Image (cartoon, rainbow, N blue to C red):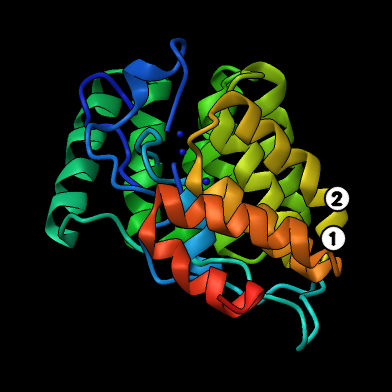
Amino acid sequence: MKLAIQSLPALGGLFLFLLTAQCSATRENETPTMAARARLNEAEAAAAADSSRPLTTTAATPVASNEPTPGPSAPEAPAVPAERRTPAEFRAEIKVADAQLKTNPRNAEALIARGRAKAQLKDYRNALTDFNAALRIKATNSVAFYNRGLTRLRLKEYNAAISDFGKAIRYNPTDKEAYFGRGIAKMQLSNYKGAMPDFNKAIDLDPQYADAYEYRGICYASLNKPEDARRDLERAAELNPDATKSLRRYAGK
């Protein structure tokens, strides 16, 4: 879920954005626990990955995707709530980025910041345009890939999101939120077994990663491994009481 620009606060909470030493200067200062959101809906999962990630742009109203979605009996992945800031604050960030880009049109950080602010305003398609522009400036920008993946997750373009999170990982192998985001995208395609290694890696990188334990536990439940599911969900609830809802739903406790 957590992918900020030095001049902008690091993203708090999908989504995720959330970074290592290389990306720490691009994170937001506001970092609420990722799992501390409405549990088990698509927007929430993206926000979990987005919880302390850098600011980036977004674009127009989401468009329905043709990609497969989980069957009715499959657990739902979380959804992407907006950050705890007002639309006016995001619009102000866009104006700041606009001014920076007027001076330097190749300012990749400003493009990412504007993109993320647009995304928080649900302007997803225009956010993608900004992330694409940032990647044309630097094709190895892991923050741009992470934020583009997060935006595609919000647009329900799950295969594209998986690809973007994979590229974010390629250029920043210690980005736990990128692993988490990729795991969420796989869950949305009902690929619970395929999501497990991503949650495993996120937990390896951060043994206190409550959201990763929670969604790995949901995967175990979906794979009919109740003991493993209970173990992970109990651990998630210890780290974040909000995960108790998932513990009750998927482990009967």
- Vertical arrangement, residue 228 with respect to residue 33, above or below: below
| Residue at the (37%, 60%) spot, across then down | 241
**In the image, 170: left or right of 4?**
right
**In the image, 40: left or right of 126?**
right
- Vertical arrangement, residue 116 with respect to residue 237, above or below: above
| Residue at the (75%, 56%) spot, across then down | 228
> Callout 2: few (<14), some (14-19), or many (20+) C-alpha neighbours within 10 Å?
some
Callout 2 amino acid? Gly
| Label 1 element class | loop
Label ID, residue 194: 2
| Residue at the (66%, 62%) spot, across then down | 230
In the image shown, does 73 or 15 lie closer to the viewer?
A: 73
**In the image, 7: left or right of 146?**
left
Label ID, residue 191: 1
Q: Kindly tell me whether residue 217 is visible in this rendering.
A: yes
The location of residue 247, given as percent across then percent down, is 55, 69
Q: Are marks 1 and 2 in contact (CB under 8 Å)?
A: yes
